[in-house]
Image (spheres, rainbow, N blue to C red):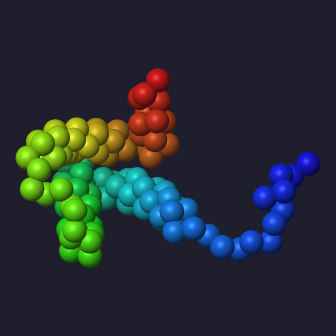
Amino acid sequence: MLHKSLMSSNKHVSPGTLFVVLAAMCWGLAGGIGGILTAEGWSSLVVSFYRGIIGLLFVFLWLILRPNNSGLANWRLWFWSVIAGVGVAGNFAFYFRSIAEGSVAVAVTLMYCAPV
């Protein structure tokens, strides 16, 4: 039996749901594009670098659109952001390296089994 809320005819989609769907689509596209680029001879580090730069551009765009209370004056935010950036860059580098050495399917399996 379906839950009553699932059967309602409300067609409204919240912005949060839309952002999650867009993020999942972009994440999936990034692995496929990374696989294509590494198959064309691009280094996994170069692919990771460009992915990071594109992400940084989106962050700057977000800060331009919503400049209030960004926290950019907080030195602790900068410190932890640098540490997180190095971790994410390493993650992406190894992710694209595993795509280059194996396949997208193997890379995704390794990526999501890592927390286990």
Q: Nearer the viewer, residue 21 or 1?
A: 1
- Residue 13, image x, y percentages: 62, 70
**Front-most of residues 52 and 29:** 52
Image: 31 above or below 94: below
**At x 51% / y 68%, what residue is drawn?**
15
Where is residue 57? Give x, y as percent. Answer: 21, 67
**Residue 59 rendering spot, x and y as whole percentages:** 24, 64
Is the residue 95 above or below the residue 74 in the image?
Answer: above
Which is more toward the observer, 46 or 77?
Answer: 77
Does residue 100 appear to the left or right of 52 in the view shown? Answer: right
State which quadrant residue 70 falls in.
bottom left
User: Residue 25, how many percent across, how many down?
Assistant: 49, 61
Q: Is residue 42 left or right of residue 22?
A: left
Front residue of 74 and 47: 74
* Residue 65 visible in the picture: yes
Residue 92, quarter of picture: top left
Residue at left 21%, top 41%?
A: 84
The correct choice, above or below, for 75 with respect to 47 in the image is: above
Give the image quarter of residue 61. Answer: bottom left
Classify residue 36 as left or right of residue 13: left
**Which residue extends farthest top?**
116
Most extreme residue toward the front is 69
At x 26%, y 43%, the residue is: 88
Identify the residue shown where x is 81% and y is 66%. Answer: 8
Q: Does any portion of residue 57 appear in the rendered image?
A: no
Marker count (numbered): 0
In this view, the residue farthest toward the right is 1
